[in-house]
Image (cartoon, rainbow, N blue to C red):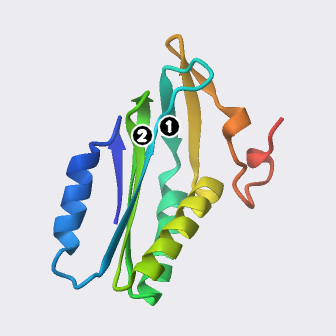
Amino acid sequence: MLSLYDGALDVPVILKNWYEEEATNNYGAYIPFVGTVRSEDGIDGLSFDIYEPILNSWFSSWQEKAKAKGAVIKMAHSRGDVMLHESSYIASVFSPKRRVALEFIDEFVEDFKASAPIWKYDLLNGKRVYALDRSTAIKGSGILGEKK
């Protein structure tokens, strides 16, 4: 399940809902990862643009990988502005065995950072400034992914 939200994520509500959705499915491990906006370089927060068709395709491939391991993966991400110390990203893996969940969440989060079509902007003094220095070109994106 992939969910997109406008603004910051309500972490307790999302994690509780996911837990309740999977509580009776006989999973022995539930591993969440919560990403929050940290204070750096004087930013007020971050802002995100998402290209949903590619994100949906990317996430579907991860759902298939999870299914092959008997696991379930869920992800939530913010669109638009997220201020300091708020969450913009949550991922969770449910699995019969903890080792599968621990390894899978690590692989998923790392690939998300490298491959998801989400563009990050710093919020500085009321303006959105593309965060080029902290962005990763999407593999296969050609000229659109090149840093200048």
- Residue 57: mark in rendering: none
Q: Secondary structure at mark 1?
A: strand
Please, is residue 3 above or below residue 124 in the view? below
Tag 2 residue:
79
* Horizontal side of residue 132 vs 68, given as left or right: right
Residue at 39% over, 88% down = 70
So how many labels did they put on this image? 2
Residue at 32% over, 42% down = 9
Q: Label 2 sits on what residue type?
A: Arg
Residue 59 in the image: x percent, y percent? 48, 66
Question: Who is closer to the viewer here, 129 or 10?
Answer: 10
Please, is residue 68 above or below residue 57 in the view? below
Question: In which quadrant is the C terminus drawn?
Answer: top right
Residue 75 in the image: x percent, y percent? 39, 59
Residue at 54% over, 60% down = 109
Q: Are marks 1 and 2 in contact (CB under 8 Å)?
A: yes
Q: Label 1 sits on what residue type?
A: Phe
* Horizontal side of residue 13 vs 64, given as left or right: left
In the displayed orientation, state which residue is furthest to the top. 125
Question: In which quadrant is the N terminus drawn?
Answer: bottom left
When asked about the image quadrant of residue 124, the answer is top right
Tag 1 residue:
48
Q: Secondary structure at mark 2?
A: strand
Cα–Cα gap, marks 1 and 2 = 5 Å
Residue 57 in the image: x percent, y percent? 51, 67
